[in-house]
Structure formats: C-alpha cells, structure tokens
Amino acid sequence: MSKILAATPEQKLASNPEASAWVSANAGSGKTHVLVDRVIRLMLEGVDPSTILCLTYTKAAATEMANRLHERLGEWIGIDDRALTQRLTSIGCESIDAKLRARARRLFTAALETPGGFKIQTIHAFCERILQLFPIEAGVAPGFEVLDSNQAAELLNSSRDM
C-alpha cells in the first residue's frame, strides 16, 4: 500500500484540472507527486487517458511517474470506501460519493486499456516524434535518425581527424 501524502494547498491547486499550472521546483519537492495527482484528477473528470501528455526531462523521471501512476491506481481497486475517500481527499477531490469512488476504481483498467499506454515521455522524445511526423515543415530530411551518444562521439572524432 502506498504512503498517503496529503497535498499542500499549492499542490492541490497545481493538480486541479480546471487550473493552468507550471510546476518548477527542486528535486525531491513533490513535482512527480503533483503531476500524478493531476493526471488522476483529469481522468476522474472524464478526460480520455490517450489525450493526456506528460513531459519530463529524463527517461528515469518518465518511468518513475508511470510506475507511481499505475501503483496508485492499482491500489485503489482493492481498498475499502473509507480508505479510497481518504486518498481522493488527499489529492484535492471534493464531494466524494459512491459514483466518484466507482469511477476511481475503474481508472486502472482505463489506464491499461489506453492504446500505447500513457504518454509519459521526455521532452526530447516528444520533440523527436513531432519532427518525424512533420519533417518537411521542420526543414529536416524525412526518415532522419537521431544519433546516439556513441555515434555522435564517432562522428566528432572522425571530423577531428580530417
């Protein structure tokens, strides 16, 4: 069972689907927690998970976010109404009734059934995908490939040797 962290008023505001938010904070300050809360609240509001995009700086952060999201939603399936109400309250939900609890318990299945899974990726991966979809508009060669670090090092070394 995951640890229940009550969100601060600022975190509740940032996770509110009706608010526009830019979250910038130090490592370990709760950014991932707030983003997971926001994704869950969006889904509770009826937003299709396939239309939600979460961007991170690192692959590790993207993996961590996806794991936390699935862990939390998976937990909600098997806990009693009182515990689920407590979880929903802790992320800023109000007016929690049987209908909202039932919806919350279905989110894990919705997440699993989302084609391609949640779109939680790095900024670089997102930008690369946009360039692949619109190469002409971006002024890059169609079918381009991004160099990995080894290829980039080899290319740099060979250009130095010229």
Image (spheres, grey):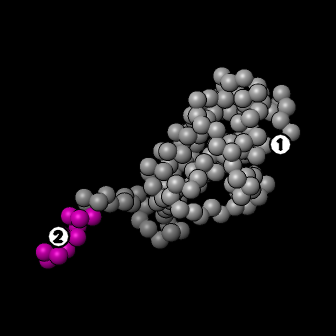
The secondary structure type at the circle numbered 2 is: helix
The quarter in which the N terminus is drawn is top right
Q: Percent x, y for residue 148?
A: 31, 57
In the image, what residue occupies the spot 74% across and 55% down? 9
Q: Is residue 47 visible?
A: no
Tell me the magenta residue range: 152-162
Number of residues whose C-alpha sits closer than 10 Å to that of mark 1, classed few (under 14), some (14–19) or many (20 or more)? few
Question: Which amino acid type is shown beneath numbered disc 1?
Answer: Glu
In the image shown, does 49 or 37 lie closer to the viewer? 37
Question: Which amino acid type is shown beneath numbered disc 2?
Answer: Ser
Seen in the image, is 159 located left or right of residue 105? left
Q: Is residue 47 above or below residue 70?
A: below
In the image, what residue occupies the spot 60% across and 48% down? 33
Q: Percent x, y for residue 90?
A: 72, 42
Q: Is residue 96 above or below residue 151?
A: above
In the image, what residue occupies the spot 64% across and 38% down? 4
Q: Percent x, y for residue 8?
A: 70, 53
Residue 158 numbered tag: 2
Task: Provide the residue designation for mark 1.
Answer: 94
